[in-house]
Amino acid sequence: MNHKTFFTLCTFCLLATTLSAPAQAESAEAKTVNKTQQLYRDHCAECHNEHRLGGMGPALLPENLKRLKMKDAATVITNGRVATQMPAFREKLSETETRSLVDYIYTPLEQMPVWGMAEIRASQIIHNKASELSDKPVFEVADLLNLFLVVELGDHHVTLLDGDKLEPIHRFKSRFALHGGPKYSPDGRFVYFASRDGWISKYDIYNLKLVAEIRAGINTRNQAVSADGRYVMVANYLPHTLVLLDAKDLSPIKLFEAKDHTGKTSRVSAVYTAPPRNSFIAALKDIPELWEISYDDNPPAGFGFWVHDYREDSGEKITPDPFPVRKIEVSDYLDDFFFDQDYVNLIGASREGKGQVVNLDVGRVIVPDLALPGMPHLGSGITWEYQGRTVLATPNLKANNVSVIDMESWKTIKNIETLGPGFFMRSHKNSPYAWVDVFFGPNKDAVHVIDKSTLEIVKTLRPAPGKTAAHVEFTRDGKYALLSIWDTDGAVIVYDANSLEEIKRLPMNKPSGKYNVYNKTRYLEGTSH
Ligand code: DHE
């Protein structure tokens, strides 16, 4: 069943339910249900999908709300949710209306949507065959590794920038609501995007053409590309799965159900590639487990899963599972995480703000109580050398500061006070500065520049008063820093990364993240991986 058939069926079920209601006068109960459904359509459907399956916002189904008590859900509707796009409905909904919406979103769907291998496979679209695409770029630039992609959320487009001339080369349509960093193939020719509603798109930068697309989930978190460029792994909130794709044309290879030994299933918080380990690391949101999935042709010890392959001629033969999973118990749910530069230690946090450090080599938690006062936005932590040791720094979504933590003692060296909670932090090996935004509140137009050698804020920029300024990415050499003005009438502003002077503004439609091919494919310190 492809996605169109699925949604047609859903609509049909909904219609059927409505039509099969007794023809007599509507009961009081039915009236309340209809009113609640109308409230949902008016206030929630745009972001959470009319069938509650998730869109810009998460799916609102009991299966995905297990960690949220009903009374807390009511508080979220009333006050909004920090660090997300969820607004407060205090002024729009009465207490009774809020309560009825809470009851509604905790009511199971009559039929839970199925998005398994068959549905995934049926959704695949091959736009252009690899054999028909030239390996010579159709445009000229001095350095193919210094290209940038800018995601423009305003009208769902992506702009390709020449990182030397700092000029746009091409602009193309993306799927609706891309989220998270696009991931490049190791040579930087191809890029993979994920949309919140599960579409993975492979784009050929050299030919400026889509190669293939597939819908890997209904409500997707993010995707990772293996360091060898062979695989794409997709993490889903709905259904509770990880999906492995062949990077060549996005054909599905394997579906992993995210569940524990009791059969309890979980949303997947996020998945990242761990290059030196030849593995993907995924955290589960409703089960305190971390999964390492090896794509190594010879998985190391510890990946002890073997499958039986029965062959008619010789009876039973034992073969290794090509993508074995190693499960690590953690001390709390991991809603987000990032790595040290060696991919030995993983630093994670739960939404409640409890931090922990997991040593991936030994496979256990080594620091259960890392001091992270707020919750960082996923993947926002960066590392650098400070007075002969490596420190990690991360903004906090719930606190007005940046935590700087010594990565040997795991103690906080400093909490750098900021003008509000920040979303993104960025630096470059060649830059003396780290940039952090103030995404929320009255100072959302401010961006702090921190001196990495003194841990002091040396400058606060306000390039577009009143408009959110956020997310910085550096050119390959670290000489220029590009900052987004998140507005439909927005821009990418180019700064000299040393003098902090503005060089130019490129008009864009609500630009969000920017991604430099070299920095991302080399997993440079200071850049999101
Ligand atoms: Fe993000 C990255 C999760 C809200 C813009 N965000 C990520 C990643 C995750 C994540 C897992 C890493 C993906 C990757 O690169 O592989 N984001 C979450 C949340 O849990 C949160 C707080 C709530 C949610 O809505 O899911 C959240 N994120 C937002 C936003 O509201 C932002 C500002 C606007 C939007 O697009 O929805 C937003 N997130 C981004 C961006 C990145 C990102 C631009 C990539 C950063 C990078 O430099 O790599």
Image (cartoon, grey):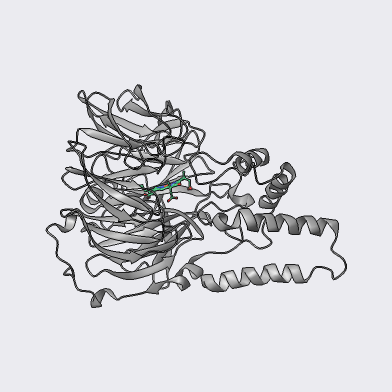
Question: Is residue 104 positioned above or below 464 on the image?
Answer: below
Residue farthest front in this picture: 465
Q: Is residue 444 left or right of residue 27?
A: left
* Front residue (pair 217, 510): 510
Q: Position of residue 331 (x, y in %)?
A: 48, 33
* Front residue (pair 283, 88): 88
Q: Hey, which quadrant is residue 456 in on the image?
A: top left
Report the number of discs. Answer: 0
* Front residue (pair 114, 362): 114
Q: Position of residue 472 (x, y in %)?
A: 30, 43
Residue 53 visible in this rendered orientation of the protein: no
Q: Is residue 519 left or right of residue 211?
A: left
Residue farthest right in this picture: 24
Q: Hey, which quadrant is residue 178 in on the image?
A: bottom left
Q: Position of residue 32 (x, y in %)?
A: 78, 55
| Quadrant placement of the N terminus | bottom right
Residue 159 visible in this rendered orientation of the protein: yes
Identify the residue at image location x=42%, y=26%.
371
Q: Position of residue 408 (x, y in %)?
A: 29, 25
Residue farthest bottom in this picture: 132
Question: Is residue 463 positioned above or below 4 on the image?
Answer: above
